[in-house]
Amino acid sequence: MTIRDAPAPDSDPRPPTDPFSTEHLKKDIGRRSARAGLVTVSAQVTKLLLQVGSTALLARLLTPADYGVYAMVAVFTGFISRFRDLGLSAATVQRAEVDHSHASTLFWVNVAGGLLLMVIGFAIAPLIASFYGVPALTAITFALSVTFLFAGFSAQHIALLRRQMRFSTLACVDVGSMLCGILAAIAMALSGFSYWALVGQAIVHAVAELVLCSLLSGWRPGRWQMSRDVGEMLRFGGTLTAASMVNYLSRNFDNLVVGRFAGAAQLGIYSKAYALLLMPVQQINGPIAAVAIPALARLQDRPAEYRRYYLKVIEIIAYISMPLAVLLGVLAEEAVFILLGPQWHEAAAIFQILALFVVVQNVSVTTGWVMQSLGNVRRLLKWQAAHAAIYVVACLVGVQWGAVGVAVVTTAQGLLAMVPGMWVAYRGSPVALGDVMRAIVKPSLVAAAMFVVTWSLHGYLQSQPLLLRLAAVLGAAALLAGLVLLVVAPVRRDVMSLLTVFRSAKT
């Protein structure tokens, strides 16, 4: 992430003449990305606080079975949603040249796709209810399918905001729509609507997102106008959609088999443990991905800068996410009790197992950014297909031991697939596998030290009150982090370099 001395541009630029031009974004992209990252991180912190607060409240108002019933449908609607923008948002961001006619045509394609997906959702609703043997799933699927149409209308507005790196506007859309959904869910849960509160949250969130992005983007679509360029974007988006579909299958087949063979209550516990674990970790990858993918796409014709930028991003992710995932795993029992309540105690074991997977997931997921930003979506699709095939078999084996067995195979396949996935992604790119391994070795050692110290202390204090264990482990983690920065010079240099990136965002 190269930082230059030129004056920093606004983090939410609006070119006065051509709203589709990105030439101004290539100038001083390191500092621009840093400023945009700070804006996005601030939004993510706000979203995290909203998520934590709403999760703690809703988990006490609803039951694990309520979450399980919703998750049964969410597996299928989430799969269908992979098609909702046909990969055209990514095509809009990745393509070097886009004009009003391109965006308008893609807008109408998205709307037509959203309408088609809604109809498909209506059609398969009875089949989903029959698959699980839960009649109530038919109505839930009907309701959630409506969100596909809303997503079709909003897709290009959001894509253009990302292309222009208007992250302040995107932050307003994200936070505002999430808040609307949360308020609706809490109101419905307090009124006794059980799992319908979660359905209401999804619908209100989608409606609010559509309204906000339409009002704030400042762009209005024109008429349909097919062209060769649009055809190329459709092919790019179609391949990317196929890769996304396969990736979704590989990441959500666990929910499908747990729900089918272990029941709604076990699925509720499994899915909530996974979601709770990913909640803080995704706040790291979310804002970084939102900034990094457009930036990498703009640098695809400048290999040296591409490589420096990507390695700096990897370093930032590793230093934050690896120790954090370790700490969450050690404090699994405390996190589940405080955030979800005593009725969710079974989730602690699953939470702890999956924490090991999350240690490497935030780094390995960036391989997709490389293939997407360089336009290598066919390679991405092939890799996702091979990975998905292995994962499906692993889940079918693991479910024989229930939700815990699925958590074990999910973690194992994530660890084993990390290096092969990197090799596939970096082949022929400006980034080398050795570069990335060197970038994450020090963060990995810090995370390992964090695990040894906090796990040992946690075990020693096992008989002590929960809050005492929590305070002691967090204190030890903070003390260890400070000691490492003080004593280990290479880590101190890395952290100071990262701080320089963030300080440059303020100037």
Image (tube, rainbow, N blue to C red):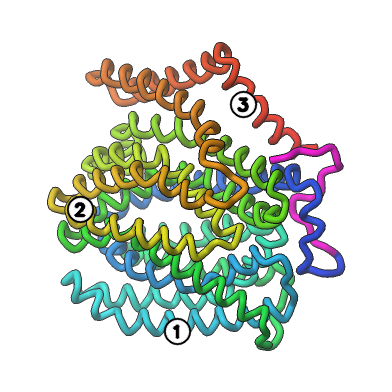
Q: Is residue 111 visible?
A: yes
Q: Residue furthest left?
A: 400
Q: Position of residue 273 (x, y in %)?
A: 31, 46
Q: Residue at x 46, y 75 (%)?
A: 148
- The mark found on residue 128 in the picture is none
What amino acid type should be assigned to the residue bearing mark 3? Answer: Val
Residue 266 circle label: 2
Mark carried by residue 495: 3
In the picture, measured across the screen, residue 219 lies left or right of residue 488, that is right
Measured Cα–Cα span from mark 1 to mark 2: 33 Å
Residue 59 among those drawn in magenta: no
Closest to the camera, between mark 1 and mark 2, is 1
Label 3 residue SS: helix
- Taking the spot 50% from the left edge, 67% from the top edge, the residue there is 240
Magenta span: 1-15
> Could you tell me residue 107's position as x and y percent?
62, 79
SS of the residue under disc 2: helix
Picture quarter with the N terminus: top right
Residue shown at the point (43%, 49%) measured from the top left: 421
How far is mark 3 from mark 2, CA to CA? 41 Å
Give left or right: position of 202 versus 156: left
Amino acid beneath label 2: Gln
Which residue corresponds to mark 1? 116
10 Å neighbourhood of mark 2: few (<14), some, or many (≥20)? Answer: many
Q: Position of residue 22 (x, y in %)?
A: 77, 61
Q: Residues within 10 Å of mark 1 (few under 14, many from 20)?
A: some
The main secondary structure of the magenta stretch is: loop
**Tag 1–tag 2 contact (CB < 8 Å):** no
Amino acid under disc 1? Leu
* Whether residue 438 is situated above or below residue 488 in the rendered picture: below
